[in-house]
């Protein structure tokens, strides 16, 4: 049966069908955390920064996929740091979740089939999508030379 050009596409109906299908591939568990770095204060006695308490914004299932080498701002133009990797994290579209912005952190509490993933700390670069989204795609940088403290 042909689809008429004048027949509107029911994006909500397609989302209802496709979202549960793509969510079946989510085998990791994550937390989206606001590290509250804007409240840093210098402690002259300990010679270190003291920050406010981080805020847990959301927790849930996800799919994590490494997609390439990231660009380290400390390197010369045209070069990349092999320790900085790019990752794509996909989660369900959740209207209750706050806006995911650059600088938020993602902590992996269950790495699915790869237990080493839950030792890493991801920093959000952006949370891109389209108007035709079945899930939320979050692009992150991760320093694979360091591990999350798990706190």
Image: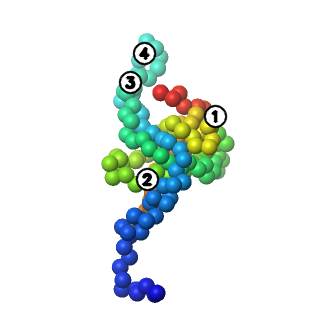
Q: Secondary structure at mark 2?
A: loop
Calculate the distance from the C-alpha at mark 4 to the C-alpha at mark 3.
9 Å
Residue at the spot of label 3: 41
| For the residues bearing labels 2 and 3, Cβ distance under 8 angstroms | no
| For the residues bearing labels 1 and 4, Cβ distance under 8 angstroms | no
43 in relation to 103, above or below: above
Residue at the spot of label 4: 44
For image coordinates 54% across by 31% down, the residue present is 148
Mark 1 nearby-residue class (10 Å; few <14, some 14–19, many ≥20): few
From this viewpoint, is residue 91 visible? yes
Mark 3 nearby-residue class (10 Å; few <14, some 14–19, many ≥20): few
Q: Secondary structure at mark 1?
A: loop
For image coordinates 37% across by 27% down, the residue present is 53
Label 4 vs label 2, nearer the camera: 2
Mark 4 nearby-residue class (10 Å; few <14, some 14–19, many ≥20): few
Calculate the distance from the C-alpha at mark 4 to the C-alpha at mark 2.
44 Å
Residue 95, position in %: x, y?
33, 52
Residue at the spot of label 2: 92
Label 2 vs label 3, nearer the camera: 2
Label 3 vs label 1, nearer the camera: 1
Calculate the distance from the C-alpha at mark 3 to the C-alpha at mark 1.
27 Å
Residue nearest the viewer, comparing 80 with 17:
17
Calculate the distance from the C-alpha at mark 2 to the C-alpha at mark 3.
36 Å
Q: Secondary structure at mark 3?
A: strand
Of all residues shown, which one is farthest toward the left?
96
Give the image quarter of residue 38.
Answer: top left
Label 2 vs label 1, nearer the camera: 2
Q: Earlier in the sequence, mark 4 or mark 2?
A: 4
Mark 2 nearby-residue class (10 Å; few <14, some 14–19, many ≥20): some
151 in relation to 137, above or below: above
The mark found on residue 145 in the picture is 1
């Amino acid at each position: 049966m042909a689809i008429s050009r004048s027949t509107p596409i029911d994006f909500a109906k397609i989302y209802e069908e496709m979202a549960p299908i793509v969510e079946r591939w989510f085998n990791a568990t994550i937390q989206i955390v606001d590290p509250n770095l804007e409240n840093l204060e210098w402690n002259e006695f300990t010679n270190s920064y003291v920050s406010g308490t981080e805020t847990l914004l959301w927790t849930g299932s996800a799919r994590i996929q490494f997609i390439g080498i990231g660009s380290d701002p400390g390197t010369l133009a045209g070069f990349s740091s092999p320790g900085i990797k790019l990752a794509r994290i996909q989660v369900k579209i959740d209207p209750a979740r706050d806006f995911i912005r650059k600088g938020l952190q993602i902590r992996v509490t269950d790495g699915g089939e790869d237990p080493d993933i839950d030792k890493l700390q991801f920093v959000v670069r952006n949370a891109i999508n389209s108007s035709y989204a079945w899930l939320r795609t979050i692009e992150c940088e991760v320093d694979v030379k360091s591990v999350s403290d798990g706190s």
